[in-house]
Image (cartoon, helix red, strand yellow):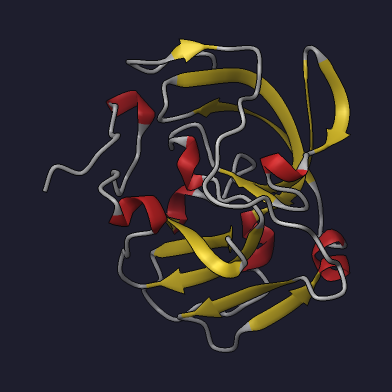
C-alpha cells in the first residue's frame, strides 16, 4: 500500500505531536516492560534487557485519525515478534493490548490489536527515527521516548502507544483507551474505520 493516501487524509512532511495527559519522564532505574496475560509465565524486562534484543529498521507510513498522514519515515526498534518470542503463549491467543504511561499510571493508556497483523517488520517498539529531512535521532519525550509502539500502516496511529510499558496477551478482543471512548476496534485507515457506531 506504500504511499497510498487513505480516504479523508492529507499528507504532511512533519510529525505532529498529539497525546493525552502528561509527558512521561523516563527513569531507567525504575522502568520495566511487562509481558503478561494469557502466557505460561509472565516476564518483566529492564530497559537494558529490552535494548539488547535484536533490532529492526523499517520504513512505515503513519496515518493519524485526526486526518494527517506522513509517508516514508524510517524507524529503528524492537519488532513486537521479538517480545512474543520471550514468552510461551496459551492456546488461542489472538489479540494483544499494548500499554503505555498516562498521567503517572504505567498502564493508564492501552490499544488493542490483532496479534497476527503484528508479526512483520512493520510493528516496532521504536527509539530512533529519520526521514528525508531529518537524520537518525532519538524519538523525543513528546513522541514517546524511550520506547513507542509504531503499528503497521493498516492501523490508525492511536494504536501506537507512547511511553510503552507492556504487552498483555489475550484470547478475546478487549477495548483499549480510545476504543472505550467510541473509537474503532479495528482502526483501518484505508476503510476509514475511525469510530464505533454500536
Residue 107 percent across, percent down from the top left: 54, 69
Question: Would you identify the image quadrant in which residue 154 lies?
Answer: top left
Instruction: Please tell me which residue is depicted at 76% across the width and 75% down the height of the picture.
Output: 45
Residue 147, given in percent of the width and then of the height, sits at 72, 52
Specify whether residue 1 is in view: no
* Residue beneath the point at 62% across and 52% down: 22
Horizontal side of 19 relative to 15 (left or right) equals left
Picture residue at 29% right of the left edge, 44% below the top: 183
In this rendering, the answer to whether 167 lies above or below 149 is below
Is 34 or 140 nearer to us in this picture?
140
Whether residue 66 is visible, yes or no, is: yes
Residue lying at the far bottom of the rendered structure: 41
Residue 129: x and y, percent? 78, 32
Q: In this view, does 140 lie to the left or right of 121?
A: right
Residue 171 placement, left or right of 130: left
Which residue is nearer to you in this view: 87 or 77?
A: 77
How many numbered marks, from 0 up? 0
Residue located at (55% from left, 28% from top): 62
Amino acid at each position: 500500500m506504500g504511499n497510498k493516501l487513505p480516504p479523508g487524509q492529507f499528507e504532511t512532511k512533519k510529525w505532529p505531536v498529539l497525546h493525552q495527559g502528561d509527558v512521561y519522564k523516563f527513569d531507567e532505574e525504575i522502568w520495566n516492560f511487562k509481558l503478561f496475560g494469557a502466557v505460561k509465565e509472565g516476564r518483566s524486562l529492564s530497559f537494558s534487557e529490552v535494548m539488547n534484543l535484536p533490532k529492526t529498521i523499517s520504513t512505515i507510513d503513519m496515518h493519524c485519525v485526526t486526518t494527517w498522514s506522513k509517508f516514508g519515515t524510517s524507524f529503528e526498534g524492537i519488532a513486537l515478534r521479538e517480545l512474543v518470542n520471550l514468552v510461551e503463549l496459551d492456546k488461542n491467543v489472538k489479540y494483544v493490548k499494548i500499554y503505555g504511561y498516562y498521567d503517572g499510571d504505567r498502564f493508564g493508556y492501552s490499544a488493542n490489536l490483532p496479534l497476527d497483523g503484528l508479526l512483520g517488520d512493520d510493528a516496532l517498539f521504536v527509539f530512533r527515527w529519520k526521514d528525508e529531512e531529518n537524520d537518525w535521532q532519538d524519538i523525543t519525550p513528546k513522541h514517546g521516548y524511550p520506547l513507542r509502539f509504531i503499528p503497521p500502516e493498516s492501523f490508525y496511529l492511536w494504536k501506537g502507544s507512547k511511553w510503552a510499558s507492556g504487552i498483555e496477551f489475550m484470547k478475546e478482543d478487549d477495548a483499549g483507551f480510545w476504543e472505550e471512548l467510541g473509537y474503532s476496534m479495528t482502526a483501518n485507515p484505508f476503510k476509514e474505520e475511525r469510530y464505533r457506531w454500536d
